[in-house]
Every structure is written in structure tokens, then in C-alpha cells.
Amino acid sequence: MLRSTRTSLRTARRTRTALALAATVALGLTAAACGSGDKSGDDKPSASRSGGSGPVPQTVRLPKLNGQKLKVTAVWTGDEQKNFTKVLDEFSRRTGAEVSFVPSGDDMASFVGSKVAGGDPPDVAMLQQPGVLNEFAQKGWLKPLGSEATAQLDKNFAKGWQELGSHGGKQYGVYFKAADKSLVWYNTKIFEAAGAKEPKTWADFLRTAQVIADFGVSPVSVAGADGWTLTDWFENIYLSQAGQEKYDQLTKHTIKWTDPSVKDALTTLGQLLGKKELLAGGNDGAIGTQFPDSVTQTFLGGDKAKAAMVFEGDFAAVNIAGAKAQLGKDAKVFPFPAVGAKPPVVTGGDVGVALKDGQAAQALLTFLASPDAAAIWAHQGGFLSANKNLDPAAYPDEVFRGIAGSLVAAGDDFRFDMSDQAPASFGAKPGQGEWKDLQDFLKNPGDVAGTQAKLESDAAKAFKN
């Protein structure tokens, strides 16, 4: 769940080996198979608007829209808004359209709903949840993608990402910003001092944690105050252990949370949460730790670090930088360890959709589906794309090139964040539903059956409404 950072963020029904991912992510190697796209446009390359070196690529032909006005909304604020505005500025430069950005606030569904009711929806919205896209499509608020945007999707994105942006057999969305939520970041100095190694399996992970605990440092920082992080722990374990078919069934609530597969996953998670010496601050400390603090306390300099490892998506890099730690040196990353046959790939992301008919909205979605738009934000950092034709050199460091390369190499072998696909009352609300139930489990990791019963009761109510 990416609620606190709004980097929404979250791949193989086909192929991806654990060794390939581990090598790519942990060593930060550039994926070799990423091409630069087909240079079909006839405009001259522009000077970079991204702040990186070199020109912005020109792989897509866009229409001239001189004087047309376009209103775009997203939850992004701060640096994310500034970086997305650079993407919009390049679109304006190429097309002549006048683009304005309107922050939606955290509750995108309510914001758009009020605008639709008032007869003035934005032309394009960047949604964070597949469930919201499906809801909007069912209400008839969304406009299907045109042929140009669809062609860019077909060329640049795996089928899995295309399916996430579709509803009822029609393509509506472009996943512009992605997140890899199957990563564990670690403090290299603590690992080296303790003699710890990067684990590949869950059993290895627990052994590594114990080695670090015996060394005298808390192994794992858990952000229990933000319930969404606990859903991500559960989802990674469940996907790897139960498999994709069960994951899909639980996501849709076609199997109950009292299913034995949920019992197995909670029991596995309890192997970590049930040993307070493995958690920074113990269980009480974990339940009081918010996500940003869970990262920074892992990478504080000198002897100030309170933990050796922290689990979360690529967006944790922003908080690592806030702790004055250097990616690839002070902070390294490995894939979430395999609980079952292979490591999980859980993703998140932001999907662009059109709420108004018109050439300008379709042109922007076409641009967002191209490598050109992704390269602009990638240069700035704090961004990940599933666009397989984005040049890895667009990313500012080897760590992100590695993460992006592994995400692209995964093809369709991924699953989107489960709680992001659930009704908001179950998977997206502080103090209720899955967030609260898993926080209660953190407080009492031995109560697997009771946790299952509460999860099922809350899910049944949410999916019924």
C-alpha cells in the first residue's frame, strides 16, 4: 500500500528466475534487454526538461493542439508534483496545449466524484487504485483509450499492466508510474560488522535476522503505525507461499480469509513478529513507528541506527536519502525472500485515465504511455516505470536501474497490491478493516485464528456493499 508516500507504486505469469532478480536488484546491474524505442516522430529533439543530461527522447508523434486547454489531477504534492509538472511542460512544448495541474487531495474518488457531479471533471486523472478505475468505468465516467495510446501500450508495456488498466474488455488506463513493493533495504555497515549475508529464502531471512540480533542490533524495522505496510508484508508472503491463483481468489474474496492458505501466511509472518528481539523497539515499538521513521532509523549514521533492515518499495529511497545515506554504498537492497518456490513480485502504481472526450486528453495519455514521458521523471529520481522501452540510462543511479530492470524483466509475473484492489472500507482506511486487523496481529502474533476471523468479518461486509 502506498498511501503515506503517494508514490504509487506497486509481473510474471511468464518468466523470471529468483537468481536473475537477485543479481539484478542486489548488484544494481542495468537490464540489458531494454531498448530505446522506435524513433517515429519527426520533431527535432528538445533540450532536456528533466534536469538530466542529454535530450528528451522523441519516440512518439503527437498532434498540434495550439490553444487547447487541459486540466490534469493527481494526489502528488511537493517534489512529486514538481517532477510530474516537468512531464506536463514537455507535453505542452511539443503540442502547444495549455495544461494546468490540480491537486486532488488524498481522496481522489471523492474529488473526482464532486467534479463530475458539478459538470466539470478534469480531462485526465492519475488514479492510484485499480478498484477506483473499475468503479469509475462502471459509472460511465471514463473514456476508452484511442488508437494511438493503445498502440503505445501494446509496444511498451507487458500484458499484465495493460489488463490492470482495462475494464469490461475496454482499455481505459496507462500505468505511468510503478512501484516495486517486494524489496528489503539494509544497512551495509551493520551487515558487514555482524557477518550477515543477503538472504534468498524466508528461512535464510530469519537466520540472518537472528545473526544480527545476536550481534546486538535489532534486525528489522517495522512501520506498524501505518497499517498499509503490514498489508504489504502479508501480501508478499501470501503470494510467494500460496501462489498466484490463490492470491487472485483472496483479492476478489472468492475464497474466505479463514482459508487455510491465510492461516499459513499469518503463521509465517508470526515467525518474525512473534519474536520481539527481531523488531526494532519490540512489538510495542513497531506499532508506534510510522513508515518514514522506519526507514530513517535504519540508516542513521554512526551508532545511531536502530535496525539493520527495513522492508518496503522502491519509494523508500526518498527516506534513505533523508537519513543522509548513500544508495549502493550505505544502503543496499535485495528481493523479498522466497517463502515458496520463488520470490514474490508485488507492485503498485498510478494509472492515467481520461474523463473527457477530446484530442488533448488522448494525446496526453499517448505521451504518458511512451518512453519519452517516463524518461523525464526518471532523470529526477524517486520514479519507477514498467515501460520496457525506457532506456535504463534515464535512471540516476545503478540501484534504480537494477530495480527497474528486474521489474521489466519480470514481464507478466507480478500481482498488484491486494489491498489496493479491495473496497476502500476494507483495504484503504486507517483504524479499520485489514489495516487495523493486522495491527492487532502485530500486537498479538499468536492469535492467528482470531485474526483470520476478524479479517473475514470485515472483508465480507466490505465486499457485500
Image (tube, rainbow, N blue to C red):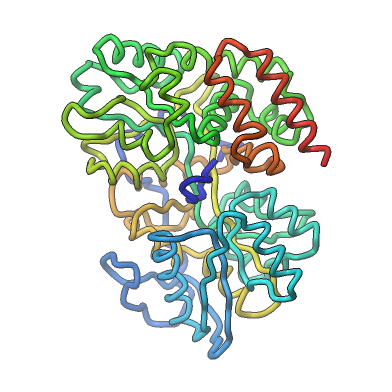
Query: In the image as oriented, which residue stretches furthest toward the bottom?
Result: 67
Q: Position of residue 250 (x, y in %)?
A: 71, 30
Q: From the viewer's perspective, is residue 416 above or below residue 289? A: below
- Considering depth in this image, is 22 or 459 the residue closer to the camera? 459
Residue at (44% x, 70% y) in the render: 85
Q: In this view, does 392 lie to the left or right of 105?
A: left
- Considering depth in this image, is 64 or 352 the residue closer to the camera? 352
Q: Is residue 236 left or right of residue 214?
A: right
Q: Where is residue 318 in the image (x, y as percent from the top left)?
A: 35, 47
Query: In the image as oriented, which residue stretches furthest toward the right?
Result: 464
Q: Position of residue 417 (x, y in %)?
A: 59, 39
Residue at (68% x, 43% y) in the render: 424
Residue at (57% x, 10% y) in the render: 446
Q: In this view, does 377 lie to the left or right of 232?
A: left
- Considering depth in this image, is 387 or 192 the residue closer to the camera? 192
- Considering depth in this image, is 40 or 413 the residue closer to the camera? 413
Quadrant housing the C terminus: top right
Residue at (23% x, 23% y) in the render: 190
Q: Position of residue 334 (x, y in %)?
A: 37, 31
Quadrant housing the N terminus: top right
Q: From the viewer's perspective, is residue 75 above or below residue 304? A: below
Quadrant in the picture for residue 145:
bottom right
The total of numbered circles placed on residues is 0
Q: From the viewer's perspective, is residue 386 above or below residue 125? A: above
Quadrant in the picture for residue 20:
top left
